[in-house]
Each structure stands twice: as C-alpha cells, then as structure tokens.
Image (cartoon, rainbow, N blue to C red):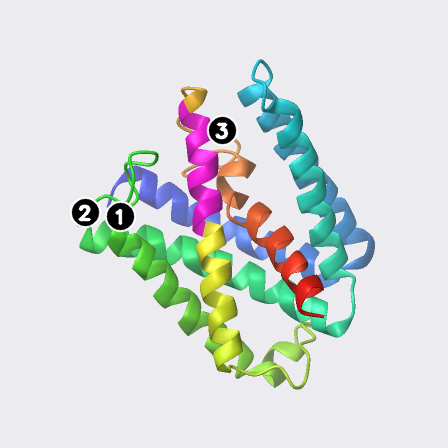
C-alpha cells in the first residue's frame, strides 16, 4: 500500500470523527467549525487564484455555499435530513471513487484530473447508494447519536434519484476544483491534511452539492 494511501486513511480516521463531533453537537460548536472551514477554504482559494479574474466570483460562491450548509443544518427537520444525506453521499462518493478507481482502474474519465476513471465514477455512485440506504433504514439507531431524520423519509425512487444527482454534482465539484488547480499549476489546494491536501481538496464536492441540494428543495416546494 502506497504511503499516500496510508496517510489518507490515517488522516480520515482523525478528520471524520472530529468533524462529526462538531456536526452532531450543533449550535455554537457547529457554527465555530463551519467558520473555521470557511476561513481556511477562502485562504486556500486566495493563494490559488488571487491573480486570476475568477478569484472574486469564487469567493462569492464559497460564501453562498457555506451559507446553504448553515441553512440546511439549522433548518426544519426535512432540511436537516437533506443535510445529512448530502454529507454521507459526498463522503461515500469520494471513498468509492478513490478505492474503486484504484482497484479496477480502466479508462480515464477526463484529462482535467488524470487519476479519475470511469470505474471510480461508478464506484462512487455504487457506494453512496449502499451507504445512504443503510443510513435511512436505520433511523432509530442513528437517533441515538442525535441525528434526527424526518420520520417519513425512506429509500424510495425519489431518494435514489436524489442520491444520483448529489453524487453527480459532488463529482463535478471535484473536477471543477481540479480544473482550477491545473490552471494554477498546483497538485493540491493546501498541505493541511496529510494524504488529502487542503480543506478545499477534501470538501470540493460538498461545496457544490450543498447549494445544489438547497436550491433543488426550493424549486420542488
């Protein structure tokens, strides 16, 4: 197993529990966590694109993206449910894409990100569907961890389509940040997280999936 993969796994074993601690605690804890992530993301974006004409639009997008995270996390029960669905789908998509891509390899997905493969893309869809299905069908168990889901939210065709859409947007977000990294001739947006890079490298899919999901809910109301 390559050193990068080992660092990635070890970092995840720390990042995921710490992140979920702040997410589940809510209130001031989550607001503090969200603010720190936002400031670091803005700093990474600044260092990556400060001399580019897309710097300011990128900052505006980050502001809107993080604001939608706040609205979903502290919204009504149905919004909080979507909040968790987005997080779990994006994390599962990322993990599935990474490990399925490494395992099966195959044709490259795009020149924008040479490491991305079609097998990784399909693996991201597959794992996100499986994990979200387990999550939804075990509401009572997760309620013990202060994860309050909408009672009538189940794994239906509509939910399946939602997962596919969120996973797709997450993968597009990943490729979008990769595109801007290529323009800036950078491998990663930062060096904060061993094996992962910067915060933007870690949440690139989420910063697109959250605003998409929030706007989708508004349109469907």
Q: Where is residue 136 drawn, in percent x and y? A: 55, 79
Q: How many numbered marks are there?
A: 3
Element type at mark 3: loop
Mostly what secondary structure, the magenta segment? helix
Label 2: which residue?
Answer: 107
In this rendering, position of residue 219 left or right of residue 28: left
Element type at mark 2: loop
Q: Quadrant of residue 200?
A: top right
For marks 1 and 3, the one nearer the N-term is 1
Q: Residues within 10 Å of mark 1 (few under 14, many from 20)?
A: many
Q: Where is residue 135 drawn, in percent x and y? A: 52, 75
Magenta highlight range:
171-182
Q: Quadrant of residue 58?
A: top right
| Camera-side residue of 212 and 127 | 212
For marks 3 and 2, the one nearer the N-term is 2
Query: Is residue 186 shown to the viewer in this render?
Result: no
Are discs 1 and 2 less than 8 Å apart at CB? yes
Image point 51% across, 81% down: which residue? 155
Q: Looking at the image, which residue sits at the far right? A: 28
Label 3: which residue?
Answer: 191
Q: CA distance from mark 1 to mark 2?
A: 6 Å
Q: Quadrant of the C terminus?
A: bottom right
Q: Where is residue 2 drawn, in percent x and y? A: 25, 41
Q: CA distance from mark 1 to mark 3?
A: 24 Å
Are discs 3 and 2 less than 8 Å apart at CB? no
Q: Give the mark toward the camera: 1 or 3.
A: 1
Label 1: which residue?
Answer: 117
């Amino acid at each position: 197993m390559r050193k990068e993969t080992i660092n990635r796994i070890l970092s995840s074993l720390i990042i995921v529990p710490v992140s979920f601690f702040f997410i589940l605690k809510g209130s001031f804890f989550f607001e503090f966590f969200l603010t720190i992530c936002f400031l670091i993301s803005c700093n990474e974006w600044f260092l990556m694109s400060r001399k580019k004409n897309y710097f300011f639009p990128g900052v505006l997008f980050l502001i809107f993206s993080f604001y939608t995270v706040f609205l979903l996390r502290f919204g009504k029960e149905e919004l909080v449910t979507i909040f968790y669905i987005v997080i779990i789908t994006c994390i599962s998509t990322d993990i599935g894409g990474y490990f399925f891509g490494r395992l099966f390899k195959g044709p490259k997905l795009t020149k924008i990100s040479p490491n991305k493969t079609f097998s990784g893309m399909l693996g991201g869809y597959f794992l996100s569907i499986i994990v979200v299905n387990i999550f939804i069908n075990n509401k009572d168990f997760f309620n013990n961890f202060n994860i309050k889901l909408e009672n009538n939210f189940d794994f239906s065709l509509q939910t399946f389509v939602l997962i596919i859409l969120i996973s797709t947007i997450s993968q597009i977000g990943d490729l979008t940040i990769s595109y801007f990294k290529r323009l800036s001739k950078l491998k990663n947006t930062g060096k904060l997280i061993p094996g992962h890079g910067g915060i933007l490298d870690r949440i690139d899919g989420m910063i697109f999936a959250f605003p998409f999901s929030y706007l989708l809910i508004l349109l469907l109301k």
